Amino acid sequence: MHSRSSALVGAAPSHAIDPDDIGYNTTDNPSLETLVAARLSRRSWLRGGLGTAGAALLGSVGLSACGGGGDGDPAAPVAPAQLGFNAVAKSRADALVLPAGYTASVLYRLGDPIAAGVPDYRNDGTDAAATYDRRAGDHHDGMSFFGLSDSGAWNAAATARGLLAMNHEAITPAFLHPAGQTVSGSGNAARRTVADEVLREFYLHGVSVLEVARTGSGNGRWSYARDSRFNRRVHTLTPMLLSGPAAGSAALVTKYATDGRRTRGTVNNCANGTTPWGTYLTCEENWAGYFRRIAATDNPRRSAKELTAFARYGVAGTGRELWATVSPDTSDGLYGRWNAEATGASAAADYRNGPNTYGWVVEIDPFNPDSTPRKRTALGRMGHEGACLGPVVAGQPLVWYMGDDSRNEYAYKFVSTQPWNPADAAGGLAAGDKYLDSGRLYVAKFNADGTGAWLELRLGVNGITSSSGVYPFADAADVLIHARLAADAADATKMDRPEWTAVNPKNGDMYLTLTNTNAASRPIDRTDAANPRFYNDPKGTSQTAQLGNPNGHVVRLADTGRDPAATTFRWDIYLFGARATASADVNLSNLTADNDFSSPDGMWFSQATPGLLWLQTDDGAYTDVTNCMMLAALPGQVGDGGARTVTNVSGGTTRTQSTVVGAAPGTSLRRFLVGPRECEITGIAESGDGRALFVNIQHPGEDTAPDFANPASFGSHWPDGGSARPRSATIVITKDDGGKIGV
Ligand code: FEO
Ligand code: CA
Ligand code: CA
């Protein structure tokens, strides 16, 4: 989500702050400006020997990258030579814009019922709070399609019926209640006074699983089954297991689970991932902001280690939705569990460790609505954006690539201990126990010469010791619970806000969106080869976001030998966001009116059309010209460009920065969709045949303070039109001739 203005009754000051905009990494790590910039040449860059041999190797085994649900016929697809549509123009209309020959329909909106007997959503803030556990959540985000067989099992080849699992990251509180959140008092004394409003919000976060089906052929109409037995909401009250090496740690003990092996709920579910056994991974991103912890009160009660961790993860403040303030609390701590202060005699008597039970990758089995989701602690605790599955090869470990979204955070990968056995493809959560509870966690270090290293986060290596000056690590659980601090100790490379990861099924290249950063987080003398730009964007709508790298970029890497378990890699920058009118040192990818964009975030490779990349934006810098958008691309591979020196200018300061830039995209990058006003485009999935594309439109109209006496003033009325309140929603895009989308 990008910044939104508070439109609330009473005071909820945290709403004015975009949690994504806050960085908590104050370490000095890799400022590559301290390294001698390596002299790059195209010849040395290509010496790693990737390219056709590696691609052929991977092509021969068939890949199943993070699309999940995947392709029904991995042997058949041939990479397209070019995109099959004309680019759409930038737009500020309150409408979806699509290329000629495509149609979008609205599938699943905020509040839509997913169980028999639940009334249609009135969308005026009066729907009964107790029904929201059977309604669509708010702020639709990462999403996966799982083909459904006639017998109700996972079948990646099923194309016309499936389960759609999707995240509901956050809420636009202004539109959920009759006239915004009811709050009394201000500052630390601000209180939520209507418990039903808070209950709605508890349910509106989390995950949806719903059954969808197509009637007719390729361009037939998609709808969801309102009464399917598979339909499920997972939300902030859903019981969950803490699984893997950190489970049972003293740092996970709460009044709710004194054994440290369970917790309640998931929150701020951002991007997603999949597994080779048909389960869904939902990733907890800006969870820290939901907790109340008034530092002046609580700090004197906490250890030095705890205070270091709170500062690094940003656990301080009133809690963005003030959930902990409802009084009286229930006997099971429905509200009080959002208070992370040490109020009791021990951790077993309060929720001081509540924040440690969030920040994980959570596995959900969409085919078993009664199953208990599992928080996979082996993948580390951070602001998880997403977890993209790498190439799946029998006999080789499984790999997931992950971004930690805040300014100056890192890129990670997890490599399973167990080699993949295709016999586990129907293993459900038991397979998750096997592959996701044991493995190696790495963080990325990008060298100036276009090489890089995956640094293992394990006690005793890479500076992660009990005597570390960053944080005295006690054991394996301490390292995973404080993965950010371990990455600091390992000297990883600070990035310009890592968002989604994606893996190209054609060659295994891993792409990472770096959505943007600002001058405070990366001043002109702190650029590095992997985060090379600093400039003044001329017409940004937010003054504070103009200076630095407000339009973001996309870095990509190839693990050495095309082995995803390798601990070294080569990288380049695939793409830079920019206005087409910007100077050559800013518009480094030579973007044109057909493909200029800002702040890449969502990103996903089609599985049905190998090589086809979808890129989505969450922008606040180019919004003077266009709403957020989705582009299609046919990228090349790591190393298809060469060395480049960027001249950065700020005021009277000029500095040069060496980097490695991929081949300019040209017409292989085109704008495919522009969304309605004040939305973010995020979350994408496809039917197994690639003939239906599911896309999430998040938080239309969130920036304009609503005047409820004058509904026409709302910043957006999408998708219902008229004077309706805006709603986050899933759309389905089909091609009018029934063909594959985008090609
Ligand atoms: Fe939830 Fe980083 O976007
Ligand atoms: Ca995102
Ligand atoms: Ca974002």
Image: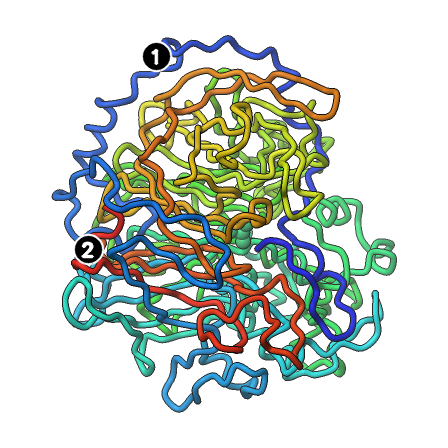
Q: Is residue 398 visible?
A: no
Residue shown at 58% from the left, 73% from the top: 202
Gap between marks 1 and 2 measured at Cα: 37 Å
| Mark closer to the chain start, 1 or 2 | 1
Task: Reply above or below: 122 against 681.
Answer: below
Residue shown at 46% from the left, 45% from the top: 500
Neighbours of disc 2 within 10 Å: few (<14), some (14-19), many (20+): many
Label 1 with label 2: CB-CB less than 8 Å: no
Q: Where is residue 270? Give x, y as percent.
A: 50, 56
Q: Where is mark 1, residue-wise?
A: 47
Q: Where is mark 2, residue-wise?
A: 689
Q: Where is residue 706? Give x, y as percent.
A: 65, 72
Q: Where is residue 91? Give x, y as percent.
A: 46, 53
Q: Nearer the viewer, residue 103 or 432?
A: 103
Q: Which mark is residue 21?
A: none
Q: Nearer the viewer, residue 122 or 116?
A: 122
Q: Is residue 563 visible?
A: yes
Q: Amino acid at mark 1?
A: Arg
Q: Which quarter of the image is occupied by the C terminus? A: top left
Residue shown at 47% from the left, 43% from the top: 402
Front: mark 1 or 2? 2
